[in-house]
Amino acid sequence: MSIEMAMMGKASADDRPATTCDDVECVMARPASMTDKLMHYCPGCTHGIIHRLVGEMIDEFGLLDHTVGVCPVGCSVFAYEYFQCDAIEASHGRAPAVATAVKRTDSSRFVFTYQGDGDLASIGMAETIHAAARGERITIFFVNNGIYGMTGGQMAPTSLIGQKTTTSPSGRIAETTGMPIGVCELLSSLKGVAYLARVPISSPKNINTARKYMRKAIRAQLENKGLGLVEFLSTCPVQWAMSPIAAMKHIDNTVIKTFPPGVFVDRVDPVDATSTPMPAVAHTGAEA
Amino acid sequence: MERLDIDVRRCKGCGLCVEFCPKHCLELGDGMNAIGYHPAELHKPEACTSCSLCAEVCPEAGIRVFRKKKGKP
Ligand SMILES: Cc1ncc(C[n+]2csc(CCOP(=O)(O)OP(=O)(O)O)c2C)c(N)n1
Ligand code: SF4
Ligand code: SF4
Ligand code: SF4
Ligand SMILES: [Mg+2]
């Protein structure tokens, strides 16, 4: 029997035919906020999963018409090709500064950045810390795969001790390169941060947890509470020289020992008086 | 009816859907798509429960999942 397809009014960025029939419903499809373009990522790379989650969130919050994405330098440099929303390509590491400008100019926009670990924690560390310290009303999606994927697998500040990369061929050693930087740990002392969480992209269960964290990081901005950041422990099967499945297992077995997952800061749904949001600065753009 | 619709144009044969399907319904096929990969196929359609776990892990956002509406057997 031929495939009966029933999208049943579910919006999707899929150009394949969607015929409707009465007794069948669609439970999962490509988010409408994504484009139909084939993504350029290597097979099994978790960048694609995180893109889909971002698309789902824009759909779910109904934000497509007033979203501005800020894209990084790194493997996800073409991320703007895969989302239907407006987007700006920032120079390497400067996405939080660009996002700050957009949000302060037009606070009605939902502004997110999508950044790798080389981008956010290496060349862009100053922008990251100061955007967080200022409590910018922006949402950061931070893809930590512990390596510079795009440029050929060089060591990142987030590479693990012992990790072999093209610039640490015998494995990273703390004596000369220090310990891996935990971005959530580092930012958690800053009062401008309204939501901060880390989640491994290693199983369907954890992907669903990522959704929950992303909702809060988005609400941190929409409810004017401060900066929201979700760190995704991600795979780079190619530069790690592992199969996509082995790379996911490596996150669960090894990466989480250095980068423990969980919620670091939550001022979106405060549980105690110490977590009151930092006062918002009125950025209307109109006075200029 | 088939519960899954795998976009063979996008599939990169990464095998994540095959690995995470709790019912072991999927496998990488012998065919090759235009971008040079062996796309995943639903080889045990009768065992599929429309749980969507395969679509959840697909990095290409290339799996659509359908199910019979509740109350209409
Ligand atoms: C100013 C500047 N310095 C260096 C580079 C080279 N460069 C391009 S991508 C990259 C690192 C990207 O790593 P990451 O942010 O972790 O992204 P991934 O590719 O791993 O997703 C570097 C150093 C550049 N493009 N611009
Ligand atoms: S190099 Fe790594 S991070 Fe970049 S697309 Fe390939 S697998 Fe993904
Ligand atoms: S919907 Fe669930 S049971 Fe069906 S193929 Fe996908 S993972 Fe397997
Ligand atoms: S997860 Fe997606 S890309 Fe990977 S084999 Fe399955 S359908 Fe293909
Ligand atoms: Mg990286």
Image (cartoon, coloured by chain):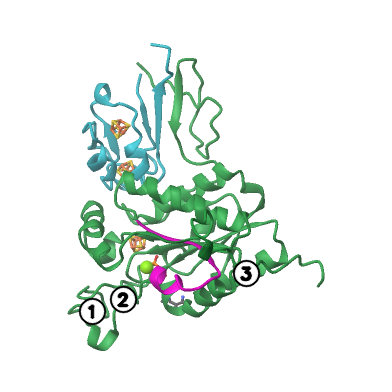
Is A75 colored magenta in this rendering? no
Q: Give the colour in which the image draws chain A.
A: green
Q: Is disc 3's CB within 8 Å of ligand 1?
A: no
Q: Nearer the viewer, mark 3 or mark 1?
A: 3
* Colour cyan maps to chain: B
Where does label 1 land, which residue?
A172
Q: Residue furthest bottom?
A: A176
In the displayed structure, would residue A265 be above or below residue A65?
Answer: below
Residue B59 visible, this angle = no
Where does label 3 land, which residue?
A100
Badge 3 sits on which subunit? A
Amino acid carrying label 3: it is Thr
* Sequence-earlier tag: 3 or 1: 3
Amino acid carrying label 1: it is Arg
Which stretch is magenta? Answer: A183-199
**Residue A261's image quarter?**
bottom left
Decide if residue A220 is on the left or right side of residue A152.
right
Q: Secondary structure at mark 2?
A: loop
Real-space Cα separation, disc 2 to disc 1, in angstroms: 9 Å
Where does label 2 land, which residue?
A180
A224 and B28: which one is in front?
A224
Q: Secondary structure at mark 1?
A: loop
User: On the same chain: label 3 and label 1?
Assistant: yes
Residue at 81% in and 66% down: A286
Residue A46 % position (x, y): 36, 54
Query: Is the residue marked by circle 3 packed among few (<14), some (14-19), or many (20+) residues within 10 Å?
Result: many
Quarter of the rendering occupied by the C terminus of chain A? bottom right
Q: Secondary structure at mark 3?
A: helix
Amino acid carrying label 2: it is Pro
Residue at 19% in and 77% down: A171
